[in-house]
Image (spheres, helix red, strand yellow):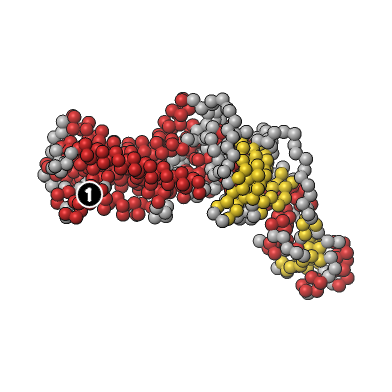
Amino acid sequence: MAIVAIAARPQVLGLGYYARVVAQETRYEFLKMFRAKAFSLSVIGFPAMFYLIFGVTNHHIEYARYLLASYSCFGMVGASLFGLGAGVALERAQGWLELKQASPMPRIVYLVAKTLTCAAIAMITVAILLALGLTLGGVALTALEVVKLIAITLAGAIPFSAMGLLISFILPPKAGPGMINIIYLPMSFASGLWMPIDLLPHWIQRIAPTLPTYHYAQIALNIFGYAQAGTSMSLHWEALIGFTCLLLGAAWLVFTRSEAKA
Amino acid sequence: MAATAFASGFQVEPLISHRAAPAAQPVARLHSVTKKYGQVTALDNLNLSLYPGEVVALLGPNGAGKTTAVKLLLGLIAPNNGSVRVMGSDPRDSETRTSIGAMLQVTRVPETLRVREHIDLFRSYYPNPLPAAEIVRIARLEGLENTFYGKLSGGQKQRVLFGLALAGNPSLIFLDEPTVGMDIESRRALWDQIRSLAAQGKTVLLTTHYLEEADALASRIVVIGKGKILAEGTPTEIKHRVTGRRIRCVTSLELDFVREMAHVMSAERDRDAMVIIASETERVVQQLMREDPMLRGLEISAPGLEDAFLALTNPEAS
């Protein structure tokens, strides 16, 4: 065991320092991710494109409303899994994360900045979806519904960022975005993010409650009254919070284990 | 390199006792540090101290433990045994790292950020950073501030990494292969910067495979092999630990014949010439010229740092 005798040092780093680090890290993380066209165009573009195709051009108001909620969730999950999952794995493999860790940057700031950035990018997606829905889709929304949609979508940033972090440790970095798609796409599909879960085969409907995205989507769909009949929202919230704790715990475990091995 | 085959002829003098410790307090210290990765022992009860104003070059073959030693000092890993201290505290605390700067080998730095943005971000990690303009000046990045990192040349990218290492005005700087990929001009310019850092009283720990670089910059060289220190001293002291001289000549003599000659430690062909490592140089040269009056292109040189390094890290019975 290492002898860790920490000499008493005067507190040099105050609140102002931490506030500045978080602000700068988040700002540049956002710029970095947003400017990476491959990432931002796909994470923002795919939900928008799908919405345009399936939600708007169908001229079916019900679809447009349903998909507004479900694609918002899809966008947040995607931003988190790719932003944190692929992002952290890549930066760790390339030695960039190591350079940041050699600096005094607090480790948690890195994760917070990435989570906030992914949330912000998902918000851009939601804004585009709302714009498309309200203008071309013929969807009518109350202000309360818009606020709820934004709030619930944002709530998904934490569990799915945790999932992204867990993935970044488990998957080999070379695998990259391809492997994340293998998790992301089937999981989203089976949770009813692309079409109502009642239309999916029975066996998928049975396994859906094991997926955090299912509960996430149900909470969002409930804003417009499209949640599955017979399920309670409190159950979905509990499930989502439970998944969040599980994912954060697992990510923390894997993180400290990898540190210890290093 | 042609030289690799020849240095095995050099003999190494036995390790003498340590040089007297300088009066100043060490800036950083690895104290009886052991680090294992599974069954592999990367560092074996290693002691290393770094003092203010020094440029210490850490040399050793791949797998010797150089990277492990640097990672321990940067607080990226913890030792199995022993302690690591930087400025008196544990580098695993982020507060301790406010006095450290590092230039590591990074395969890809985010390319969608501009040079000034990278600098601005790293400056924010430190409570008392250097002004951005100063960092740009030291790292010779004038005119490149708004360029995206991905658009820079290899040498310019290295300069940005050097600038990031200095962003926090550190007292202790780690440079891992800092001039890799640089042209001669940039390399010399960086060497000047490193010398001026030491002149300011800062401490630099340098790992490099360019022995010329270690020879040019280091006030102290530490040679590591298999997790232990093999030799420690000024470049001159290290070179003096290797006995023998190198004789190069163009001769028609047979290689085997030369190898059998008295005082010859090794002999190899190098293109059209022969390179001989020998003690009692003058005797050997006399005999060579007796045996081959047509011998020409005679050069005699003292062992270089490269020879010392190879002899130290590949000990062979002569």
Taking the spot 63% from the left edge, 45% from the top edge, the residue there is: B33
Density class for disc 1 (Cα within 10 Å; few <14, some 14-19, many ≥20) is many
Closest to the observer, B132 or B128: B128
Q: Is residue A46 left or right of residue B161?
A: left
Taking the spot 72% from the left edge, 60% from the top edge, the residue there is: B315
Which secondary structure, mark 1? helix
Q: Position of residue B238 (x, y in %)?
A: 75, 50
Q: Amino acid at mark 1?
A: Ala
Taking the spot 70% from the left edge, 68% from the top edge, the residue there is: B271
Q: Position of residue B16 (x, y in %)?
A: 79, 49
- Residue A139 quadrant: top left
Residue located beneath label 1 in the image: A208
Count of residue discs: 1
In the rendered view, would you say A179 is above or below B133?
Answer: below
Taking the spot 20% from the left edge, 48% from the top edge, the residue there is: A192
Q: Is residue A94 left or right of residue A10?
A: left
Closest to the observer, B134 or A174: A174
Q: Is residue A81 left or right of residue B300?
A: left
Q: Chain of mark 1?
A: A
In the rendered view, would you say B12 is above or below A35?
Answer: below
In the rendered view, would you say A46 is above or below B170?
Answer: below
Closest to the observer, B116 or B303: B303
Q: Is any atom of residue B135 visible in this view? A: no
Q: Position of residue B85 (x, y in %)?
A: 62, 37
The residue furthest front is A1
Image quadrant containing the N terminus of chain A: top right
Q: Position of residue A11 (x, y in %)?
A: 53, 25
Q: Is any atom of residue B203 visible in this view? A: yes
